[in-house]
Image: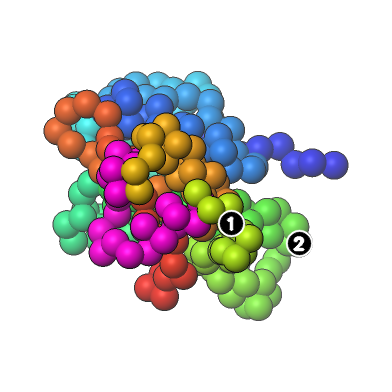
Amino acid sequence: MTPEPMTVLIVDDDFRVASLHEAFVQRIEGFRVVGKAHTSAEALKLAKSLQPDLVLMDIYLPDVDGLHTLQEMLRWPSPPAAMVISAANDVINVRAALRLGVTHYLVKPFSFAQLAERLVAYRDASAHIDELPDEATQGDINHIFDLMRPTAAPLRPELSRLAPTLQGVYDALNASNTPLSATEIAEDLGMSRATAQRSLTQLEQSGAIALELRYGRTGRPEHRYSLRRRRTDQ
């Protein structure tokens, strides 16, 4: 019997960013977005009514910051788990989030792969907890915390089997020291932007490259791509 997906509430003051995060989450097996909030007051109201399993919380909200919002949720009888997704990378906020017991802290901009790895790690750890008896051994507990550490998935497909257009796009990213946009790839390889974007999307969905969202002051985040390498700093 297939388990019910974990329900997710997304909290971000930017409507476009919240929708992008929703699209990311919906691509990950075992998760379902049940709501989006753009203020602390809205987040508290939706969290109480929807009772999500997990909240993806931004820190910079227009009324009350996200950490104080999570602190309020923790006073409830059955509070949701929480992951911080924010541009805030100062130590004060990181320390405060740690004290609140957030599952992960992801700094913008980030790739789809980085979010997926953390959500999958939390999903797997939660599933293991559900399978345990009333009392856990130290080995059980160690395994739960090991599962919470995100790990990169193997790269695919085999590069030797890539079509010539995909190989050209991959090689262009490999030769660049910085992430590239579809427009830059198209100009570099002399192809249309639509062709470059299709190739980038296919490579990103296969796990061979990573999508990074760069957030400006206004407008939609810029999509940039780079090779997805195994990380050793997680």
Answer with left or right where residue 112 lies relative to residue 135: left
Residue at the extreme front of the image, as rendered: 190
Residue matched to label 2: 133
Give the colour scheme shown: rainbow
Residue matched to label 1: 162
Answer with left or right where residue 95 lies relative to residue 143: left
Q: Is residue 57 magenta?
A: no
Q: Position of residue 89 (x, y in %)?
A: 21, 55
Amino acid found under the numbered disc labelled 2: Pro
The residue at the point 30 percent across, 39 percent down is 183
Judge the density around disc 1: few (<14), some (14-19), many (≥20) Cα neighbours within 10 Å. few
Q: Considering only order in the chain, which callout, 2 or 1, is on the residue closer to the N terminus? A: 2
Answer with left or right where residue 93 lies relative to residue 203: left
Q: Is residue 170 magenta?
A: yes
Q: Position of residue 222 (x, y in %)?
A: 28, 38
Amino acid found under the numbered disc labelled 1: Leu
Q: Is 84 situated above or below 178?
A: above
Magenta span: 166-188
Q: Nearer the viewer, residue 223 or 162?
A: 162
